[in-house]
Image (cartoon, helix red, strand yellow):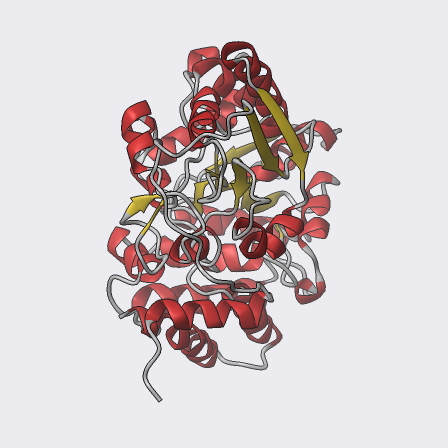
Amino acid sequence: MARMTTTQRRVAATIATATVAVLALSACSGGSGAEESGDNTLTLWHYESETSAMGIAWNEAIKVFEEETGATVEFEEKSFEQIRSTASQVLNSDEAPDIMEFNKGNATAGLLASQGLLTDISDAVDEYGWDDKLAPALQTTAKYNEDGVMGSGSWYGVPNYGEFVTVYYNKDMFAAAGLEIPTSYDEFVEVMDAFVAQGVTPLAEAGLEYPIGQLWYQLALSQADRQFVNDYQLYENPVDWTGEEITYATETLKEYADKGYFSKDVTGVKAEDAGVSFINGTSPIFVSGSWWYGRFVDEVSGFDFGLFPFPGSDLTPGSSGNLWVVPENAKDKDLAYKFIDITMRPEIQALLGNNGGLPVAADEADITDEKSLELIQAFNAVNDKDGLAFYPDWPTPTFYDDLVAETQELINGTKTPAEVQEGLGAAYDSYVDDFR
């Protein structure tokens, strides 16, 4: 049997793991010069709630768009799962919207781009200058090559918000324990040891879902450089699964478990439960994403919280937010580009930021909410040093589940660190080898 191409293998793997039907490629058409629908209507899909920062900002963008263009926006709110599970079928039909929000990454936007279902918007990016507003790491998730691998090739989407992992801390619990914000990794360990000595579990953590994998990856990043990230995420070179970065992360995570830095039953804890344990003041430290910030502002009571970067690391998990993409079968691509441009304007970016989001192109002077400014400044500090390193589960469609399963074995002691690394490496290489 003839060997399948990389794209064919990639599509086949995604069908098996995500149950996404792969249909015939749609016919190619031009970029911003595509034929317009003629009815002056923009069909828009996204899955953000009306009260979220993105929902608030985009609703305002819709008003501005309709006022300036005279066009009508037909907005349809879809769930994340609706869009994820039906994207291939819908985008290959005449029911495709003109613009929609879609998840970034190789197994999502990259897959659709490789199938020919998304428009190459490189000409529009040049025309509107969106690339000048996006830091290098933010651009990575917007570009995909012919195999759907992010980081190079053509532009297939534009993000207008971002996200990153940081360290949340309970200021009152720190003060009561006589502890200060750690500025080095050794100090961070000393803080956790001090809480353990006082009978307090320092880390709110979850091993049944994503936070534990992010912590593992953050530990690896503390020993890594940008080339490691490019190898791991962009497949530039083979990843050494017995190398310094991954060995340190795996062995250190095991040490965290043995020292009682997180709950003994962490493997049965969900992300929601971990976040609530921080909100309730049970654990003083939570290493997780900026998407929790707005909720903490709303729900934390009885103590003040703050954040600090993971000590001793110039790299952190994070990326752009999801992308505005323009389906290849969109009826009015020019209107789609005009809408994207409005979401990148300073006033819309400021609205997003003042409601707890992370705008990619806001002027800090326009952010009037003190807590929102704290988060935005922390995000900008990461971008200023090109520190966003994406997420640990991105390289393969199944790696999220692989990470959860292997770290559970590690924490439960049913596998050694070396065995966990071997298992992760085998899962990673079985997919990524097709791209080399």
Q: Is residue 278 visible?
A: yes
Residue 283: % across, % down: 67, 46
* Image height of 291 relative to 376, above or below: below
Quarter of the image where the C terminus is located? bottom left
* Image height of 185 relative to 428, above or below: above
- Which residue is pictured at 56% across the width and 39% down the height? 97
Observer-nearest of 364 and 70: 70
Q: Is residue 407 visible?
A: no
- Which residue is pictured at 43% across the width and 43% down the height? 319
Quarter of the image where the N terminus is located? bottom left
Observer-nearest of 238 and 176: 238
Outermost residue on the bottom side: it is: 1
**Image label count:** 0
- Which residue is pictured at 60% across the width and 71% down the height? 408
Observer-nearest of 98 and 40: 40
Residue 272: % across, % down: 71, 49
Quadrant of res 258:
bottom right
Observer-nearest of 74 and 108: 74
Residue 232: % across, % down: 34, 61
Residue 359: % across, % down: 47, 27
* Image height of 328 relative to 337, above or below: below
* Image height of 87 relative to 138, above or below: below
- Which residue is pictured at 34% across the width and 31% down the height? 33
Quadrant of res 79:
top right
